[in-house]
Image (cartoon, rainbow, N blue to C red):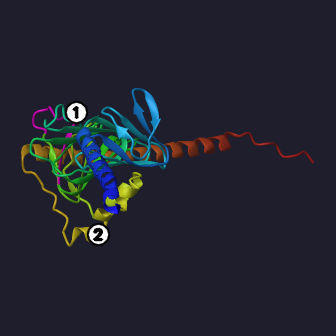
Amino acid sequence: MTRYSSLPMKRMLMASLVLGFAASSAMAADGKAVIEKSEGQVEVIRMLKRLPAQKGMELMQKDIISAGEASAASVALPDGTTVEVGAKSRLKMTNYLPDDAGAPRHTLLELLNGAGAFNVRPLPPQDSFEVKSPVAVVGVRGTRFIVVHQVSRRFGVQSSVAVVNGSVQVKSVRFASMPGVSAVVVQPLQKTEVSAEAPPTVPVTLPLSEIRVMAAQAGLSSTAESREMQPAALDGQQPAEPRIPQTPEGVRAQLQDSFREALQEVQAQIQQQAIQIIQERIAVDNQKKVIGRPVAPPPVP
């Protein structure tokens, strides 16, 4: 009696397992990106509506993830890629779904402002993955890297790209179509910078500790504290030497980089001299006022 009474229970368990497997398969087939973590003030801007970002929330194409001050969010893509959105940053999920089932996946994420850390899984040959800022386009095959986009009085509009492992190709949005201006390849523990006025600089070697500081200052705390960002993760690996291109395009990029640094130094010197001249003129004017002040006659006894 006991043996037969257990059959309905077994059937119910089998049915629940089958339904659970079907549900998970449907979610995998659906392939939506989801919010993995939301800390502080994080919103999803969708069709001009602002929705509070919550863990497990599915993201649609064209959604914009907006993180406020002292806030951060993490996103998991269907291909296993993870993205961290830093404080005071906005990331647009421009395109991450294939047009048809089985079609190549061409992922495009746009960092509108702020900072983002990207851990991209190795891609099949037919797929592509790009991260775009207002001034730079980063092509990826499978790597971990950081993009920081900022606007400042000193550097103007500028994007910095630093690579932890793997490699990326960086090109300028403005100068990509110009003849003679090529993209640069950024190797592990290297950084390049792209501005609105110039193509990418020649990659320079950057210690892992500085990349961690760069991530922390940009509000990418999870990335800065991750295992991959610890010195032990390198396993004795030495930073790659910056590859100095000998092509005319590479030489031109080097000259542009040197010219930019020299121009910044000259501007700083001119500003300092101007301040000194103004201070000297103010001092002279004050002396003239003191000298030209009428002297009171001595008192009459």
**Residue 214 in view here:** no
In the shown orientation, is residue 212 left or right of residue 141? right
Residue type, label 1: Arg
Q: Residue at x 23, y 36 (%)?
A: 97
Query: Percent position (x, y) of residue 121?
Result: 20, 52
Which structural element holds mark 1? loop
In the shown orientation, is residue 205 left or right of residue 45? left
Chief SS of the magenta region: loop
Q: Residue at x 29, y 48 (%)?
A: 15
Q: Nearer the viewer, residue 186 or 236?
A: 236
Residue at the extreme top of the image, as rendered: 47
- Magenta segment: does it hold 243? no
User: Distance between the Cα atoms at labels 2 and 1?
Assistant: 36 Å
Q: Residue at x 22, y 56 (%)?
A: 204
Residue indicated by mark 1: 174
| Quarter of the figure with residue 108 | top left
Q: Nearer the viewer, residue 160 or 122?
A: 122
- Magenta segment: does it hold 169? yes
Residue indicated by mark 2: 231
Discs 2, 1 touching: Cβ within 8 Å: no
Which structural element holds mark 2? helix
Which residues are the magenta region?
A: 167-181
Q: Nearer the viewer, mark 2 or mark 1?
A: 2
**Residue 16 in view here:** yes
Q: Residues within 10 Å of mark 2 (few under 14, many from 20)?
A: few
The mark that comes first in sequence, 2 or 1, is 1
